[in-house]
Image (cartoon, coloured by chain):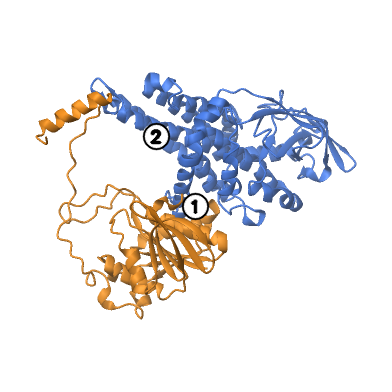
Chain colours: A orange, B blue
Amino acid sequence: MKIVVCVKQVPDTTEVKLDPVTGTLIRDGVPSIINPDDKAGIEAALRIKDQVGGMVTILSMGPPQADVALREALAMGADEAILLTDRAFAGADTWATSSTIAAALKKLDFDLVIAGRQAIDGDTAQVGPQIAEHLGIPQVSYVEGIEEVTNKKIVLKRQFEDRYHIVEVKYPCLITTLAELNPPRYMSVGGIFDAYREKTVQVWSLDTIKDTIDMANVGLAGSPTKVKKSFTKQAKGAGSKYEVGADEAVNIIMTKLAEKFII
Amino acid sequence: MDFKLSREHLLLQEMYREFAEKEVKPLAEELDEEERFPVETVPKLARYGFLGLPFPKEYGGQGGDYLSYAMAIEEISKVCATTGVVLSAHVSLCCAPIYEFGTEEQKKKYLPSLLKGEKLGAFGLTEPNAGTDASMQQTKAVLDGDKYILNGTKIFITNSGYADVYIIIAMTDKSKGTKGISAFIVEKDTPGFTVGKKEKKMGIRGSSTCELIFENCVIPKENLIGKEGQGFGIAMKTLDGGRIGIAAQALGIAEGAIDEAVKYVKERKQFGKRISQFQNTQFQLADMYTKAQAGQMLVYKAACAKQDKEPYGHLAAMAKLYCAEMASDVTRRAVQLLGGYGYTREYPLERMMRDAKITEIYEGTSEVQRMVISGFLKVN
């Protein structure tokens, strides 16, 4: 079983701040982590490997600093890691990103591709499904459980608005995972030593994937998304907290709503 | 000179912190309150590689360095000093002497299961009449054909009762003084070996500290470590290494107390201000943090010297002396910053203050460290 997990390194906060002038993310001083949905994807891949055997490859597109996220995945137990990094990839929207990652996947042999549902810094949930479309393989998104795994098929529990679906799918396929799928294992001490001493992070540039990518879909120039404006939502004033009984609570709510002319 | 941690050490630190926060911290209060050994944590320490951290892979270790090991004790002791000493005693006092002084057969027999954490280790030197003056060993080992027969009592033995393998120091020839002392490997369940009374302690209350009783305990001759008469040297060198672990434990306790105090002073309001806005609070914390950072440099320097096989006994002694006294001072000040709340068991500071004290006493008191350091200066 060959599994590729697509991961993104993200700032360790859901309260991403934007530069008010440029509208871009302020990353200084914010520690970076593996995106939580993606980390669940790594754990899922490692559990499948524990169960049926195989090989887990981690694939990430990002700046050179994303190396540490890949080392972390290696230290958790992944077998190999590839970092797609090139100045030409900069400014990619979800379309250009998924095109680039799909181009890299075309150079790899895989049965199963796992991507996190969405990244905490962008929240689009588009890249995983787009990769599947570029590759022309089936996809199951919002996976919250893995019911059964064999070397031929996988049975998944897909989260839905008011229910869940049990979906059986054959390989090759792509799934997107939710953070609640599993609690990811810690890196192990020996895993960390191996990640730096015995394993390597392969660095792939645009040149590496030039024969599998359409150059019109690369980086900022290949990104159809145009961001008109980014801004930080202004925080509201501090809320009030009342620890009272139900009747008094209703009175307080009614009074407040009336004060604000809502009712 | 490079004061920066490598990328490998930074990733280890991140892993240690996550492990300590999620697996060790939630138990700390309960272990202290109930004087309960962390039985559930030991297999987790094993699974993630802590118990064989600074030993080569060929014996089942993780192939790590001594700095990585000291950092692990530091991070774990930030949240639970009990768990810190379980790790330190196992690695520094049991695995290290087998690895450093054992025969190839002893290493192959004992290290794999110890380093993988299938077995836990302990070390028995102290006796009722042989504390700081460790040369006054009354436990005797008498050679009888291809066996040694042990008789005597050890006290204050960390991990006792839960350990599977014990390094035991005993007199083989009293007429030779310290040159008549030898070191042995004794397995639990050896007939004639029992674990006695458990001590009730002021701090590190989850750590098991008991007496060991040997009554005609027969062990194979091949369990002698090194040669007869080398035991005192083995014990002293083992303690040199152990002191880095205890220094790291003390450092961790101090850092943990600073973390708790910083969190509290930002929340607590008095006289209409957060108490972090008072200069006394700021200056106290500035002093506490500066001392902890100075201690960290001593610990890391000693660990690197041991790793590089440089003379490190005096460095380990300085690291332990300084960090132990620093931890007692820092935790006392942290309790003071929390005032009445600091004195209650609702907050972990009073536990940290109690835990800190032992680091001035075990594996060589602060007075012994001063003897080692002044000996290095050749002023004795």
Relative side of A256 to B317, left or right = left
Q: Nearer the viewer, residue B339 or A165?
A: A165
Mark 2 packing: few (<14 Cα in 10 Å), some, or many (20+)? some
Q: Nearer the viewer, residue B310 or A255?
A: A255
Q: Nearer the viewer, residue A213 or A153?
A: A153
Q: Residue at x 43, y 55 (%)?
A: A40
Dot 1: chain letter: A
Q: Nearer the viewer, residue B40 or B176?
A: B40
Relative side of B130 to A125, left or right = right
Dot 2: chain letter: B
How far across and down, in percent of the image, does residue B310 sit? 58, 48
Residue A150, disc: none
Amino acid carrying label 1: it is Met
Q: Which residue is mark 1?
A: A187
Specify whether residue B282 is in view.
no
Specify whether residue B345 is in view.
yes
Secondary structure type for disc 2: helix
Give the alpha-carbon distance from disc 1 to disc 2, as whole Å.
24 Å
Q: Residue furthest bottom?
A: A211
Quarter holding the C terminus of chain B? top right
Residue B259, disc: 2
